Amino acid sequence: MGRHAKGRHFVGEISDAARKLAGKVEVDFADWHELRKDQVRCRVIVGDALLEKALDHLIRCKLPPRDEVLGQLLAAINLNDKTRLAYVLGLITKGTMQDVKRLHNIRNIFAHECKPDSYDPDLVKQVLALSTVKGRKNQVTRLNLMDFYFEAGRKCRDSILRAIDESKAMTQTNDKKNQTAGSRPE
């Protein structure tokens, strides 16, 4: 067999093997391509990771550094625990804490379901519980369900970023007071 004939034979073997698997594999290969194009899934998962990083930053701004202990602690706890910690420290409101937890639950649906959609009862339940839906449940449809999700995400992001700015401003004010107090003659 010539060089090209061997190559065609090899490709034929791969095609035959793929055909045999077609009825036995839960997700066909075309679906993997669709998953890559799923912009909503990517936005949900990446948005959740960014919220977690913002919470890490907020908590680090509030707590004094203790070597690497704080970094190790933050690396060891999940997003829901970080959210509760930020709430207990008075860094975020109870409403923000609840929304971040729901946003994370929605992230888990998108991360662990093969094809999450607006017909998923768990997804609908989590979105309907978001603060952005309050008083507007009758306006929520399967077509705009994720709009309420993204609105809640922006609201939480803005709340966390405001808290970071306030914490930094307070730290700078305290630093200036300490510098002024340290430079006074006795």
Image (cartoon, rainbow, N blue to C red):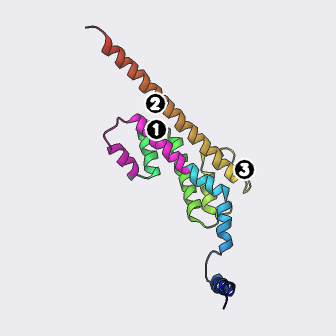
The residue stretch that appears in magenta: 48-75
Which residue, as the protein is rendered here, is positioned at the far top? 185
Local crowd size for mark 3, using a 10 Å CA cut-off: few (<14), some (14–19), many (≥20): few
- Quarter of the rendering containing residue 185: top left
Local crowd size for mark 1, using a 10 Å CA cut-off: few (<14), some (14–19), many (≥20): many
Residue at left 41%, top 43%? 85
**Residue 114 versus residue 147 in the image, above or below:** below
88 or 166, nearer to the observer = 166
In the rendered structure, find residue 17 and report the number of the disc placed on it: none
Query: The C terminus appears in which quarter of the rendering?
Result: top left
Q: CA distance from mark 1 to mark 2?
A: 8 Å
Local crowd size for mark 2, using a 10 Å CA cut-off: few (<14), some (14–19), many (≥20): some
User: Can you give x and y, in whole percent of width and height, for residue 101 in the image?
Assistant: 52, 50
Report the side of 29 relative to 143 (left or right): left
Of label 1 and label 3, which has the lower sequence position? 1
Q: Are marks 1 and 2 in contact (CB under 8 Å)?
A: yes
The residue to which callout 2 is attached is 167
Q: CA distance from mark 3 to mark 2?
A: 38 Å
Of label 3 and label 2, which has the lower sequence position? 3
**Residue 130 versus residue 164 in the image, above or below:** below
The residue to which callout 3 is attached is 138
The residue to which callout 1 is attached is 58
